[in-house]
Amino acid sequence: MSVFIGEIIALSMMALALGMDAFSVALGMGLLRLRLRQMFYIGLTIGLFHILMPLVGMAVGRLLSREFGSVATYAGGALLLWLGGQMIITSFRRDDGLPLFPRGVGLLFFAFSVSLDSFSVGLSLGIFGARTMVAIFLFGLFSMVLTWVGLFVGRHFQQWLGSYSEALGGSILLAFGLKLLFL
């Protein structure tokens, strides 16, 4: 029993680490003027992607882990750079139209980019098993909750920053994209 509890604690720490990326990026996205319903769907979508991506990673297998892990990191970094750039560009526009994301396909791309780390973890987890399913559940739960927390914290700061909040959010996404590409 103590081994199981120890494994749950270790998996929870891994899920927390994976969810912190989602939190950080959601913090920047929370600077947009999002409705509570949008925030709910963003968190839910990211949580689902943090469940699906490790499952896909397990299906692909360990052999592709090294090559695809670096390609996934670069793709995620490029996508965050693109999304951050879009946020900054839309912050300088005077029209009140909604930004290109976080709706529809944009939300899916965003959730995909944030969950790429969990894909790599899925590759390393290997084969299916009861504890693996617990890990996948924890990945989804932690990332969903941390995304909601990041969105709410970002939303709170948006009220203080006013019209500059979207540009700041885009800058945060750009910084994380650069981190993925160069570190």
Image (tube, rainbow, N blue to C red):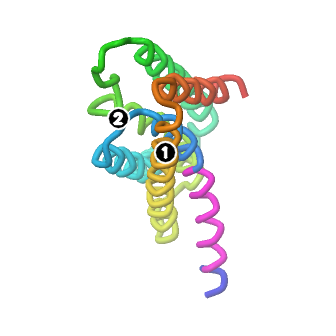
Return the residue nearer the eye: 13 or 88. Answer: 88
Q: Quadrant of the N terminus?
A: bottom right
Q: Which mark is residue 156?
A: 1
Start-end of magenta stretch: 5-19
Return the residue nearer the eye: 34 or 157. Answer: 157
State which mark lies toward you, 2 or 1. Answer: 1
The amino acid type of the residue labelled 1 equals His
Q: Position of residue 160 (x, y in %)?
A: 52, 37
The amino acid type of the residue labelled 2 equals Leu
Q: Secondary structure at mark 2?
A: helix
Name the residue at 56% across, 37% down: 64
Side of 81 where 56 appears, left or right: left
Side of 11 where 47 appears, left or right: left
Name the residue at 63% across, 26% down: 175
Q: Position of residue 59 (x, y in %)?
A: 44, 47
Residue that extends furthest to the right in the rendered view of this protein = 183
Q: Which of marks 1 and 2 precedes in the sequence?
A: 2
Q: Secondary structure at mark 1?
A: helix
